[in-house]
Image (cartoon, rainbow, N blue to C red):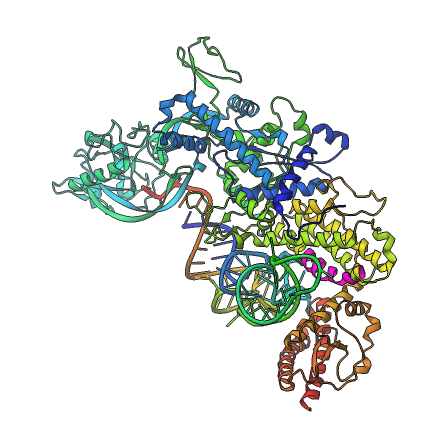
RNA sequence: GGGCGGUUAGCUCAGUUGGUUCAGAGCACCUGGUUUACACCCAGGGGGUCACAGGUUCGAAUCCUGUACCGCCCACCA
């Protein structure tokens, strides 16, 4: 005998133990041999690996709940549903965290050395990595933990190295000196994607550069038309004006450029200008890049600190001059007074010096985007530096085609365009990082011959000259250089392809749009390049979790919500339901971090409702075996047929919404069915058949229907709220001898098929009438303050045409209602004062309340209703009188309008009769 | 500078192809409730000219144009 279930769902007592039992039974594990033997169709998801830097936040909660819903659903559908979990070593992010830890001990990474430092990072990530995986388990994620990866695992490292070498051999990875984004705090290069532009209110400074005496034509040029940015200094020297947002860079200027077609300055091209503060002279060059319309039409060229200037210098054959240290202070290439100054101090100092020399022409406010480091938010400095790059154009071609031809789909579809735009304008990917935490670049430089060796295995000697004086490149690879390979490196590539053959390509890639370029786009490129095939077929991009004010949740703002706290307080089911029910396609989710109760109570309440629906059903059905629906078919009553019909409709809709990632609609459908239809109506209607001295057949029909419906709805709910549903499902009494569609646990129970033969339109119509009637009676009782306990007669048909009623026999369900409550149906004598309502079907509900109601008040109420209804009726009639409407609208729409007009007409007439009868009293 | 998304009840948001699930849900609010599944509940109720202005249409929250705010992404105009 089972122990009684607690009236309130106690999530803490069920969640952990259920999860444990799922693990023990191996439900999450999918082996390639099992797939082959059972001939099941794989469904594979690779997790977007959380960074090992920190505990999970709500964004992870959402991301992983969605994936778990999908994986559980597919598993129940009979697919070999494999979800591969893992974590990302998160190069810069992790290194920063550990460096900060060191900092609190007064140390830097240089104090502990490269080896000591990486050891510290390893011990840090061993802890945090394990915590993250535990958190995923706590929210119910059904991953195949035996396959857990870490992007720095030996296997994945081999994949990284293989890819690097292959790309090198194909000429798709190269080393070169270019302007890259440099973070002066992290002391590393960044990719373009890692430099985030932030709008800033900056200044645009206009600087005067004196034209050398040799440029004798200056006066003539200045006299020409439009050369407004030229002028004479006090000593008569001609100057020109250039503009910049970063005046300190002028110390590294190597030229001033004008557009070759700019007629104003033709005479100056080839002349020299004196670069203030430096004593250097620099040439005036021409270049197409210059926009004659902008500013003076003259641009200062700082090749070492601006990508465009670098390009111009290349074209003009100028040598760049680096003026910054890695920390972004001024180096020895600048004049003495500025050396060693921080870049922003130098900016001030340069401006002061120019001002003093009368060379600062002016300052304007200027709004522009300033790139910041995506990890530490330091202003990024464009810097000339030797780095490794991936040539991306060739990789982008198939990746672009995959989107264009629909091989890979995006949900919501608007991201398709964003993706394609990025692919079309892709720039080479800077993959080297001057960090210690990450995959070391597999390149060795020979001290003797200077050649480099690029190798799959660590070489002991130079591949060119055989010298053993070789040294490995000190840098590591961008952290995304390992995660972009996951769809295949996660399956032992390149070691062996047994798993790969079965599980590649994967299916759904679920993530936030923020990493569309970082990760999704690159995985697609890698998939085509190394597997010759797309790595997945559909990309589902969900929204961002924000706080009540719409701000992204972040540690620094302190507006985050800890998923584990929610799991403890409200349960994993509550967390999951809350997140998914807010997850409309393409929209962000807002949660109030200051009021967890307000945010998560709806989920908790729903889980509790499921619990109680189950509890009541189990209790009232008892433990003796029930019959199948087939067996009780002849005895099914209207309410049974109705709930089965609604169940079927819900089943169909839920499957459809899942297919289309309309997850919040899945929640809505199931909420409405479970709470609205099943709990509020069916359970109430069925009570008398279970407890009272009902006849045995009716009772058995009810029991069968209850168990069947509960079984199915628990299955449908399971992907959303796996814990409460599993706990209940395990206790269902099954029809004797039936093994059909059974399973050991709900998690592997078959997903319900819908079966339109269960639809019963007449039962639905009848029950809807009943619902309307009951609602009308309740409404009247409430309006007239009749206590719920008080018995009151209910008449159908109305005060003026009592003879016409005969409703009782036509509506067996009504009798049942009479039995549940306190309602009796009799043919009214007529002529009584009472409260009434008219149903859409035209049937009138009447409560004789002589002496209880105020006739005047009832008259007023009726008048209001009459005027409202006649207004509506006018509208409908006008519509029907419109020839264009009748002619052009679809026939069924017109028909519906006619029916509406008829029913309004009938209803109105009844109301008027009633009003007249009352008014006459 | 370009592109995209948003503006619906006090709050958070739904509303698929324009026409009975079109004005909705949850929360909050008001009224009543010791109905033996659930007060994390039950019943009833109030509340929105769907940002604004035009347009298309027999018919617009839904399509088009423009405006105003809010947000995001991309961009080498110094």
Q: Is residue A680 magenta?
A: yes
Residue A54: percent from left, percent from top: 48, 36
Q: Quadrant of residue A109?
A: top left
Residue A206: percent from left, percent from top: 25, 44
Q: Quadrant of residue A486?
A: top right
Q: What residue occupies the far bottom of the structure in this picture?
A: A920
Dominant secondary structure, magenta: helix
Residue in view at x 84 percent, y 72 percent: A809
Residue A377: percent from left, percent from top: 38, 39
Quadrant of the rendering where the N terminus of chain A is positioned = top right
Quadrant of the rendering where the C terminus of chain A is positioned = bottom right
Quick check: A313 left or right of A892? left
Quick check: A594 left or right of A677? left
Residue A667: percent from left, percent from top: 64, 52
Q: What residue occupies the far left of the structure in this picture?
A: A235
Q: Quadrant of residue B67?
A: bottom left
Q: How many marks?
A: 0
User: Which residues are drawn in magenta?
Assistant: A672-690
């Amino acid at each position: 005998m089972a122990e009684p279930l607690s009236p309130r769902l106690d999530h803490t007592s069920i969640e952990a133990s259920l999860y444990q039992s799922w693990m023990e039974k191996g439900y999450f594990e999918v082996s390639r041999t099992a797939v082959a033997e059972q001939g099941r169709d794989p469904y594979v998801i690779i997790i977007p690996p959380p960074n090992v830097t920190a505990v999970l936040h709500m964004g992870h909660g959402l991301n992983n709940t969605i994936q778990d819903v999908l994986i559980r659903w597919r598993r129940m559908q009979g697919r070999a549903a494999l979800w591969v979990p893992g974590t990302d070593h998160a190069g810069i992010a992790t290194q920063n965290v550990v460096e900060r830890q060191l900092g609190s001990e007064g140390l830097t990474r240089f104090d502990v050395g490269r080896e000591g430092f990486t050891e510290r990072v390893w011990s840090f990530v061993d802890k945090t990595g394990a915590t993250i995986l535990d958190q995923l388990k706590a929210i119910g994620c059904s991953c195949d933990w035996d396959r857990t990866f870490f992007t720095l695992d030996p296997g994945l490292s081999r994949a990284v190295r293989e890819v690097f070498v292959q790309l090198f051999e194909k000429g798709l990875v190269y080393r070169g000196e270019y302007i890259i984004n440099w973070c002066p705090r992290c002391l590393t290069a960044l990719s373009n994607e890692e430099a985030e532009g932030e709008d800033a209110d900056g200044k645009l400074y206009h600087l005067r550069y004196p034209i050398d005496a040799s440029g004798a034509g200056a006066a003539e040029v200045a006299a020409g038309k439009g050369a407004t940015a030229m002028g004479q200094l006090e000593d008569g020297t001609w100057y020109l004006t250039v503009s910049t947002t970063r005046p300190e860079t002028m110390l590294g200027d190597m030229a001033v450029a004008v557009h070759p077609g700019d007629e104003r300055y033709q005479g100056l091209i080839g002349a020299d200008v004196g670069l203030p503060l430096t004593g250097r002279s620099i040439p005036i060059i021409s270049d197409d890049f210059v926009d004659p319309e902008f500013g003076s039409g003259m641009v200062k060229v700082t090749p070492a600190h601006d990508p465009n200037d670098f390009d111009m210098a290349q074209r003009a054959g100028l040598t760049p001059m680096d003026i910054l240290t890695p920390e972004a202070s001024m180096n020895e290439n600048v004049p003495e007074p500025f050396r060693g100054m921080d870049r922003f101090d130098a900016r001030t100092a340069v401006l002061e010096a120019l001002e003093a020399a009368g060379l600062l022409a002016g300052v304007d406010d200027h709004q522009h985007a300033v790139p910041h480091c995506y990890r530490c938010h330091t202003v990024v400095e464009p810097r000339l530096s030797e780095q490794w790059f991936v040539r991306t154009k060739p990789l982008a071609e198939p990746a672009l085609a995959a989107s264009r031809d629909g091989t890979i789909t995006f949900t919501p579809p608007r991201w398709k365009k964003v993706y394609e735009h990025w692919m079309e304008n892709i720039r080479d990917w800077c993959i080297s990082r001057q960090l210690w935490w990450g995959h070391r670049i597999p390149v060795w430089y020979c001290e003797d011959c200077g050649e480099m060796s690029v190798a799959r295995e660590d070489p002991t000697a130079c591949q060119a000259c055989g010298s053993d004086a070789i040294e490995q490149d000190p840098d590591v690879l961008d952290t995304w250089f390992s995660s972009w390979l996951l769809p295949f490196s996660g399956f032992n590539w390149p070691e062996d392809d047994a798993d790969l053959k079965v599980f590649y390509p994967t299916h759904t890639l679920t993530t936030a749009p923020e990493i569309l370029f970082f990760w999704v786009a690159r995985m697609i490129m890698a998939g085509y390049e190394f597997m010759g095939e797309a790595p997945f077929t559909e990309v589902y991009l969900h929204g961002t979790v924000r706080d009540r004010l719409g701000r992204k949740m972040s540690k620094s703002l302190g507006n985050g919500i800890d998923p584990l706290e929610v799991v403890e307080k409200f349960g994993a089911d509550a967390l999951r339901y809350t997140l998914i029910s807010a997850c409309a396609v393409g929209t962000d989710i807002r949660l109030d971090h200051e009021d967890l109760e307000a945010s998560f109570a709806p989920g908790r309440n729903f889980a509790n409702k499921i619990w109680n629906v189950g509890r009541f059903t189990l209790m009232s059905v008892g433990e003796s075996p029930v019959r199948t629906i087939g067996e009780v078919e002849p005895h099914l009553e209207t309410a049974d047929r109705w709930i089965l019909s609604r169940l079927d409709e819900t089943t169909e809709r839920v499957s459809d919404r899942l297919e289309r990632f309309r997850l919040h609609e899945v929640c809505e459908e199931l909420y409405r069915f479970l709470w609205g239809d099943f709990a509020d109506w069916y359970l109430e209607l069925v009570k008398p058949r279970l407890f009272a001295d009902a006849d045995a057949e009716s009772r058995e029909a009810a029991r069968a229907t209850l168990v069947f419906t509960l079984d199915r709805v628990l299955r449908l709910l399971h992907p959303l709220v796996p814990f409460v549903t599993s706990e209940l499902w395990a206790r269902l009494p099954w029809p004797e001898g039936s093994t059909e569609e059974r399973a050991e646990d709900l998690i592997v129970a078959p997903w319900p098929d819908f079966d339109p033969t269960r639809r019963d339109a007449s039962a639905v119509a009848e029950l809807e009438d009943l619902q309307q009637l009951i609602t009308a009676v309740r409404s009247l009782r409430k309006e007239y303050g009749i206590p719920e306990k008080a018995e009151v007669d209910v008449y159908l048909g109305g005060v003026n045409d009592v003879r016409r009623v005969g409703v009782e026999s036509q509506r067996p369900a009504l009798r049942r209602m009479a039995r549940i409550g306190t309602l009796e149906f009799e043919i009214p004598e007529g002529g009584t004062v009472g409260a009434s309502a008219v149903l859409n079907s035209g049937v009138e509900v009447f409560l004789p309340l002589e002496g209880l109601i105020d006739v005047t008040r009832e008259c007023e109420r009726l008048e209001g209703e009459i005027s409202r209804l006649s207004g509506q009726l006018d509208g409908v009639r006008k519509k029907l009188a419109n020839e264009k409407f009748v002619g052009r609208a679809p026939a069924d729409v017109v028909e519906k309008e006619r029916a509406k007009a008829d029913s309004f007409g009938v209803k109105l007439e009844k109301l008027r009769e009633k009003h007249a009868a009352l008014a006459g009293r």
